[in-house]
Amino acid sequence: MIMKKMVLLIVLALMLSSCAQPLTAAPTNPTSVAQSTTVPAAATTAPIAATTGPSKCTAANMYTTKIVYTPGPEGDAMTKVVDYFNTTYSQKVCVTAELEFFGRDQLFTKQEAIMAAGTDQVDAWFITSRSLGKYGKFLDPIEPYLNDTTVNTWGGTKDHFIKSSTDGLTNLDGKLVGIPMDISANFLIYRKDFMDKLLSDPTWQATYKKISLAQMGKDMTPKDPDQWTWDDFLATSYFFTKKYNPDSPTEYGNYTAGKVMPADAYLWSNVYYDYGGSWFDNNGNPTFDNQAFRDALQIWKTMFTNGLTPPGSANGEYPETSAAITAGQVAMSVDWNAAYNDLNASTSAVSGKLAVVAPPAGPAGRFVHNHTMALALNVNSTHKAETMRFMTWLFTDEASKLYAENGGIPPVASVLTGMSDAHPDYKWMSDYVAAYGKSPAPYAGIIELMVSQYLAQGYTGQLSIDDTAKQLQAAAVAEMAKYK
Amino acid sequence: VSKRKARDQQTSILLLLPLGVWLLCFAVIPLAYGFWLSFFDARMVNLSNPAWVGLNNYITIFKSYQFRFSLFWSLRFAIISVSIEMVLGMLIVQLFRKNFWGRNLAITLFMLPMVISPVLMGTMFRLLFDQAIGPLSYLLSGLTGTTAILGMNWINSTIITADTINMTPMVFLNVYTASNGVSGDLTEAAKVDGANAWQTLIYVIYPVIMPILLITFLERILAGFLMFSLVFALTGGGPGIFTQSASIFIWNTAFASGDFGVANAASYILALLLLFPALYLVRRMMRTIL
């Protein structure tokens, strides 16, 4: 009997211990650790010779830093970078880097859960420029380490990167919290063969004039896409839509991706910026209830209500945009830079027929939305200096070039321009972002889904433009109030 | 006898213990934690120290137009799609009640969509229904008059169609199995009394399998009401909130907006709404089994 009771107790204890383990690993309070942002003493007392002198690394002072990264092309490129660093430099700076791939789907949700637990098992997070406000509490400013020559033995500075990318990773308090790794921007991708004909064929030009006058009340002439305003974009969309021009070679003028998702809201943001709008003012307050918002939303609404974009694009995103361009269904689209390479591949039906410029201009200027994937230091890491011995190496040409050669797009002008033969889109990226780049505010990630939902209700006519502006403003202000 | 009874009880406890601990860890504690969170302003940034807000999250949910819209959408979707699936499933069973060459293969093929996960189904349908390259949208354009079946005018019908293809086999499976369990004596007797096939079905077979039909209907209604994966993969709840189900609303609130307090409050309201039909379903199931 006693034996049985003991067995029962042992089984119970084992069960409960396995159950309780994750619960007893109580999350540390991020705020308590967040206060320590200075470089740990160990980093300053143990100078590491990165490029000079013999290696002093021993098993005791060697550290493996754990870095979250996204799988896919960016992860493949980063793997090569890390492998190279581990082979070439790890014994010099006594750090090896190890990538932790969380899976592309819901990567940020998984990461947030671990962040919230206050873990110190990860040394660097994978973030995006627009999510700084959301994760700020879990990120440590990196400039103290960048300025510390005992940690940053590579001599890199933040000027290594295109300014727009570091601006996008700077919090409202002016502190840089991310290392720009991979930049994405919006291009206007268009059918060059059609535009060339439009610019040279008098019959097409006459039709263009007629349609623009009838639909927009403006007597317009075709222009080079690099000179376009949004009026030119609209007029050209009308021209290439069969409903308005039965001789159009395409069914619809453009593809306006309208699915409820942040990426599509950012595509619209190009128009908003051009009309003088911005998601936030300088103090971090949402700003949607204004004339720029109404004007910009009206342009997107026109696409849907006047049938200038395929009706299915209300639920379309990146792959559907590419499918429509490849199928010859549309003449152009404001799209993500990554699309160009796939669309122009030798196997593509539209290979060699596409060209790229920055999105059109508006009354307030011409802007190119861009955001950056980045690495940021975990505020709860117990090995920040060691981690930064590796991460400061990412501020060098060597690391950026290696990353680009393996499929990544580092926001480094010299590297992108140097690869223009193999990747013309890299040079465009560099040129357009340098000339017109605008990064979203660090808090954009908090309200990006909300913005995309309201925008979609506005441009599909579920809400009037005025109601969209007012309701989105109220909702965004209420949401942001919870974060302040 | 009492010693044996006590030993049996101990053995029962020992055998049930793993399940009990599993349920405690992965059902009871998370549920209790979620209920507790529903009274707090709980976000990623303050999850370790959330702020007490009392019933505010519940008030927010009751005032939310999006939540009301999502509930209505879910209810409408559940009723329409499940009604179609029930009728189709019951009719298709009649096709397979007679023996014909290739019947087993046909049943296997018909059952295939059921074993595909709804999220994969949604992703496949996004391609098949695509306006530019989708073969199904092209083939269906003869009926719909457009290839834009993912656009505003058709999207609700498209989602119902996708769910019908995915879930009618489930109804079929239940009804087919139950029908095959009806005693041949009953149908023979009906035939002797002069009943035709239709009368036999309506007055003999369906009354006998009514508990299974009811359970299937209720189970499908509950599943339809909680629909997430298929719609999420197809539309993400859009355009705007046009196809946002209650589950997508909760997911967006929790994981896109990071507002776990409001998301948990919404979850508990949804759970309360579904509690009574769920309890009824369980009672009927237990009665049918016992």
Image (cartoon, coloured by chain):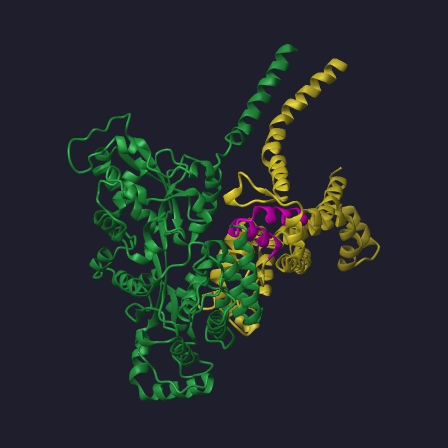
Chain colours: A green, B yellow
Observer-nearest of A454 and A200: A454
Q: Is residue A346 above or below residue A195?
A: above
Residue A399 vs residue A320: left or right?
left
The N terminus of chain B, quarter of image: top right
Observer-nearest of A456 and A169: A169
Which stretch did the figure color magenta?
B245-270
User: Is B262 a magenta residue?
Assistant: yes
User: Is B22 a magenta residue?
Assistant: no
- The image quarter containing residue A421 is bottom left
Dominant secondary structure of the residues highlighted in magenta in the image: helix
- The image quarter containing residue A385 is top left
Measuring 60% from the left and 27% from the top, which residue is drawn there? B18
Q: Position of residue A128 (x, y in %)?
A: 39, 51
Figure label count: 0
Q: Is residue A278 above or below residue A113?
A: below
Measuring 49% from the left and 36% from the top, which residue is drawn there? A29
Question: Is residue A106 in view from this perspective?
Answer: no
Q: Position of residue A267 (x, y in %)?
A: 42, 64
Q: Position of residue A89 (x, y in %)?
A: 22, 37
Residue A104 vs residue A157: left or right?
right
Q: Position of residue A173 (x, y in %)?
A: 40, 51
Q: Residue furthest left?
A: A53
Measuring 82% from the left and 53% from the top, which residue is drawn there? B192
